[in-house]
Image: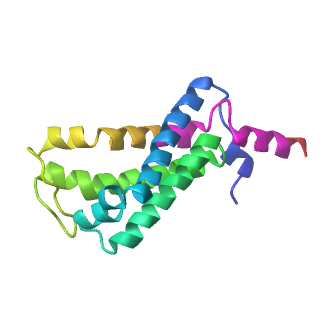
Amino acid sequence: MIDFNRFLKTHPKLTYTLIRLLTGVVFFSEGIQKFLYAEIRGAGRFEKMGFPYPEFTGTLVGSFEVLAGVLLLLGLFTRFGAAIVFVIMSVAVVTIKIPILLGESYGPFVLRDLSHYGFWAMLHEGRTDFSMLICSTFILWEGAGKYALDTVLLRNRENN
């Protein structure tokens, strides 16, 4: 059985809150842009990358990015939001960054047209992805930080 109190527990440090807010802003804004600019950030982008059912995939990923962003910004069920971020970023590395590293498409995943490929190109193109992977891992481990609704929920559960 899941210990819900442990799921909500966090360290009351402001710096943890800042990492959570940074991650939340990035994901909320990227998710919204998948709907506002579907041709370049949503379905159109997923189609160019070789994803099956790009309309569905773009909408699904955009929806999860908005959900994760809102949860992280509010500090509500923060670890769940961070888990969403971790999964999305892991898929992005496998489907987008690995082709850049290899310098060729593999499976259904199409290599983007870049000026160069290989290790350094992958690190450059993946800098946000890797940062978000690290931030989401930190949040999964440490929790929401000082100013979060998780803290309020935990306090209410412990007082009842």
Q: Is 148 covered by the magenta stretch?
A: yes
At which x and y percent is residue 48? 23, 64
Q: Nearer the viewer, residue 139 or 29?
A: 29
Locate residue 59, reporting x and y percent.
Answer: 44, 65
Residue 143 visible here: yes
Q: In percent of the image, x 14 and y 62: which residue is there? A: 105
Looking at the image, which residue sits at the far front?
36
Give the residue furthest to the bottom.
Answer: 53
Q: Position of residue 85 (x, y in %)?
A: 47, 50
Residue situated furthest right in the rendering: 160
Identified at 58% across, 48% down, the residue is 70
For the point 55% across and 29% down, which residue is it? 18
Q: How many marks?
A: 0
Magenta-colored span:
136-157
Q: Kindly indicate the quadrant of the structure image that contains residue 41.
A: bottom left
In this rendering, would 44 be left or right of 139? left
Q: Is residue 13 above or below residue 56?
A: above
Residue 86 in view in this figure: no
Q: Quadrant of the N terminus?
A: bottom right
Q: Main secondary structure of the magenta part?
A: helix
Q: In the visual, does 141 lie left or right of 124?
A: right
- Does residue 155 show up magenta in the picture? yes
Nearer to us in this view, 37 or 122: 37
Quadrant of res 92: bottom left
**Residue beneath the point at 58% across and 36% down:** 142
Q: Position of residue 156 (x, y in %)?
A: 84, 43
Q: Is residue 146 left or right of residue 86?
A: right
State whether residue 53 is above or below residue 37: below
